[in-house]
């Protein structure tokens, strides 16, 4: 019991794999995903800062690093299921929030409970830091699905994840999105691919939506 339990629980994120049940050339766990999201968020925080935004770096790093911690309670639910309806997504979010709140109350000393309730809550909100987290999270979805497609995985689930990630990213109101679309995405599309899927066409269609 206590903080020791919290520290031990972190290892569970290394054993939880994303896109469960799908064939993948390379599996990714939730712990590595959180690290990559933090790296993306760090870069795009700098992009926003160079364009005049004031970044709360502590908040940004905490949001990015902790954003998927609640998955230790319910796992990584398949993307098509998780987003099947707004009602279902809201129910899942409430379950995650409730279980995280209970965990904090049961395992953390009282003087740290309010602090960790704040650290482990849903970080995607209307703040600049929350929108950077949204971008970074979708970007990792994009990279994971892009890599599968590029290696020749023609499973429609990864094509759909890639397409939906592009659509979501392009609608996030940040300078970072323009930077990604103008500087990073073209580099991705120039890479050689072993896939029968026309990823450039899928990208163009998604950007046109």
Image (spheres, rainbow, N blue to C red):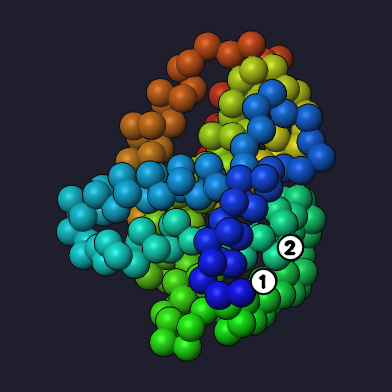
Residue 96 is tagged as 1
- Find disc 2 in the rendering and name its residue: 74
Categorize mark 2 by other alpha carbons within 10 Å: few (<14), some (14-19), many (20+).
Answer: few
Label 1: which secondary element: helix
Picture residue at 33% right of the left edge, 41% below the top: 179
Quote the CA–CA distance across marks 2 and 1: 7 Å
Picture residue at 52% right of the left edge, 79% below the top: 108
Picture residue at 30% right of the left edge, 65% below the top: 58
Assign the N terminus to one quadrant of the image.
bottom right
The image shows residue 56, relative to residue 136, as above or below, that is below
| Residue farthest toward the bottom in the current orientation of the protein | 110
Label 2: which secondary element: helix
Assign the C terminus to one quadrant of the image.
top right
The image shows residue 123, relative to residue 43, as above or below, that is below
Q: Nearer the viewer, residue 96 or 106?
A: 106
* Residue 40 in sight from this viewpoint: yes
Where residue 34 appears, as percent x and y from the top left, is 50, 49
Where residue 65 appears, as percent x and y from the top left, is 45, 56
Where residue 51 appears, as percent x and y from the top left, is 20, 53
Residue 194 quadrant: top right
Q: Nearer the viewer, residue 30 or 182?
A: 30
| Residue farthest toward the right in the current orientation of the protein | 21
Left or right for 208, reference 182: right
Marks 2 and 1: CB-CB under 8 Å? yes
The image shows residue 38, relative to residue 3, as above or below, that is above
């Amino acid at each position: 019991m206590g903080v020791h339990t919290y520290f031990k629980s972190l290892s569970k994120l290394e054993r939880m794999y994303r896109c469960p049940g799908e064939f993948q050339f390379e599996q990714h766990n939730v712990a590595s995903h959180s690290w990559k999201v933090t790296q993306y968020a760090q870069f795009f925080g700098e992009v926003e800062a160079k364009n005049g935004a004031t970044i709360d770096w502590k908040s940004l790093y905490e949001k990015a690093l902790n954003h998927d911690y609640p998955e230790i309670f319910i796992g990584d639910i398949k993307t098509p299921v998780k987003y099947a309806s707004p009602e279902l997504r809201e129910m899942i979010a409430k379950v995650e929030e409730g279980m995280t709140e209970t965990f904090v109350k049961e395992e953390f000393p009282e003087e740290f409970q309010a602090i960790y309730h704040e650290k482990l809550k849903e970080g995607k909100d209307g703040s600049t830091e929350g929108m950077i987290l949204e971008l970074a999270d979708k970007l990792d979805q994009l990279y994971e699905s892009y890599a599968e497609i590029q290696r020749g995985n023609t499973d429609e689930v990864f094509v759909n994840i890639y397409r939906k990630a592009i659509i979501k990213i392009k609608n996030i109101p940040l300078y970072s999105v323009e930077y990604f679309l103008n500087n990073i995405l073209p580099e991705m599309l120039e890479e050689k691919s072993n896939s029968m899927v026309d990823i450039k066409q899928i990208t163009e269609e998604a950007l046109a939506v």
